[in-house]
Image: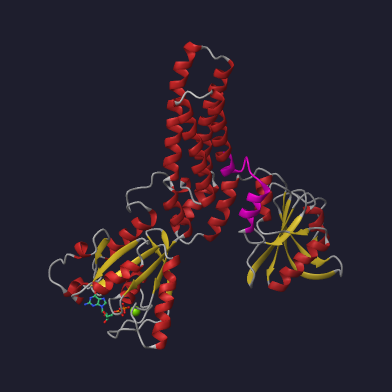
Amino acid sequence: MDNYDTIAAVSTPIGEGGIGIVRISGPEALDTALKLFTIKGNVAAVEERRMYYGTVFDPGEKKAIDDGFMVFMKGPRSYTGADVVEIHCHGGTLVLKKTLEAAVKGGARMAGPGEFTRQAFLNGKLDLAQAEAVIDLIRARTEASLQAARGRLDGAFSRRVGEIKEALLDLLVNLEAELDFPEDEVEGLMSEAIEQGLAEAGGRIERLLATYEEGRAIKDGVRVLILGRPNVGKSSLLNILLKQERAIVTPHPGTTRDVIEEVINLRGVPIRLMDTAGLRDTDDHVESIGVRLARERIETAELILLVIDVSSGSFDEDMGILKSIENKKVIVAANKIDLVPGRLDVEGAFGGQKVMFISALGSTGIEELKDAIYEESTGRPYGAGLDAPPGELVATVRQRDALAKALEGVWRAGTALKEGLPREFIATDLRHSVDRLGEITGETTTEDILDRIFSGFCIGK
Ligand SMILES: Nc1nc2c(ncn2[C@@H]2O[C@H](COP(=O)(O)OP(=O)(O)O)[C@@H](O)[C@H]2O)c(=O)[nH]1
Ligand SMILES: [Mg+2]
C-alpha cells in the first residue's frame, strides 16, 4: 500500500439507495475523475468544494453510465488529506460498480479496507486513536456509544494520553539534565521531584486504565445470558427488559427451545440479551438441543442472569446451575417475589452472589436489576458519573495494553530510582513508557499494527 497512490472505492453501502458515492483519493484524483465525468456547461477550471452536474461515463466504451454530481476537495483540506473527488450518482449496485470500474480504467487503484482512513492517518489528518474511533462512530448503537466515539474522533482521548506523555517527557528531560551535571547537592532535590512526577504520571495512567471496562462496554456492548431452570420466568424477564412480547411465555416447562437474542439499550450500554431453554435433563429431543445450545452460550457470555423462582421452595437445582458457571460474572435474579410474603434469605443461600429481587410479572425491581446489570457490565455503579467525559474512556484492547505497558515502565523507573540505580536505567524505562503512549496515537507504530486496525474497516471508509 502506497500513500501516493490514487485509490477509489464505493463509499456508500451496497444495495439500493437514492444516492451512491464513489470516492477517489490521491494525487491524480481530479485527473482520474475527469476521465469519467463530463461537466455540463462551460467550466474553464474545476474549483474546489463546488458541486458540478454532469455525466458519468465509461472512459473505455465512451458510454454514459448515469448523470450526477462531482465535488473536488483539494488536499490537505479533505478527509484523507490528499486530493479527493466524490462522484454522486444513483445508488444502484450496477451503477456504482460501473462507476468504480470507470475510475479504475481512469487510472485509480481499488482501495483496500479502511484505506481512505489510513491515508488520513498517514497524512496526519487523524491520529491512530481517532482513526479507530471512525469505525466506532459508524457502528454506534446507542446515544452513549455515539457520544464516546464522537469525542474520541475529536481527539479527547488522544489529548489525555498526550498530556501524560508530555509529563513523562519533562521528567526525561530533567533526568537527562541531571546526567549531564551529576552534582551531589542537586541530586537529592531532583530525585524527590522525579519520584513525585513518576507517582503522579503513574496515577494518571491508572485512572485512565480504570475506564476501560466502561469504555469497552459502551463501545462494543455486553453479552448477557439469561439462564435458569424451566419455568422460573426467564422469557418473562426477557420480554419485560425488551418491553415487548418477544419470547413465548406459558405455564408449561420447556416452552423456550431456541436461543432468542435481542439487543437493548440499557442505560446507554448496548446489551445483547439471550433467552435460553431451561436447564434440565429431558427426554424431549428438541428441548434437549435447546439445553445444549444454552450451555454452549455460557462460554461467550460476559454476564449471566441466573433466574430463580423464590416460590419454588428449594434452591438445590439452582445451586447446581450456579456451580456449573462458577467462573462467570453472575447476577441472581430472584423472581416471583409477588408470590411469597416477606423476604426470603436468598442471599444466605447464594452466599457471595449479587441477588436482585424481582417480579417479571408484576414488573417489580426491574429498574434496580438494570442498574445492577450496568454495574456488573461496566465495573461502575450507574449514575455515579463517569471519571471522564465519554470521549476520554479507553475503548480498545490495543489502547488498554499500551497503557498497561506504559504503566509498567513508570513503575520500573520508580523502583530503579528508589534503589539508587544509575540514571540511565530510569531514563530507559521512561523512554519505553513514552513510546508505548506514542503507539496509542500512532507516533510510534508499525505496518503490522496499521494492517490489523484497518483490516477491521470496510472498503470505502
Ligand atoms: N407470579 C409470577 N409468575 C411469573 C413471574 N414471572 C413469570 N411467571 C410465570 O411463570 C411461568 C413461566 O414463565 P416463563 O417466562 O415462560 O419461564 P421460563 O420457562 O423460565 O422462560 C409463566 O406462567 C409466567 O407467567 C412472576 O414474577 N410472578
Ligand atoms: Mg422460556
Image position, residue 301 (x, y; %): 42, 65
Does residue 356 show up magenta in the picture?
no
Residue 157 vs residue 306: left or right?
A: right
Ligand 2 quadrant in view: bottom left
Image position, residue 411 (x, y; %): 46, 34
**What are the residue bounds of the magenta stretch?**
438-455
Image position, residue 357 (x, y; %): 23, 66
**Helix, strand or loop: magenta stretch:** helix
- In front of the other: 118 or 50: 118
Q: Residue at x 33, y 79 (%)?
A: 280
Residue 434 vs residue 320: left or right?
A: right
453, above or below 318, in the image = above
Image position, residue 332 (x, y; %): 28, 65
- In front of the other: 379 or 313: 313
Q: Residue at x 43, y 71 (%)?
A: 297
- In front of the other: 114 or 43: 114
Q: Residue furthest bottom?
A: 284
177, above or below 5, in the image = above
Q: Is residue 77 visible?
A: no
Residue 421 vs residue 308: left or right?
A: right
- When asked about the image quadrant of residue 143, the answer is bottom left
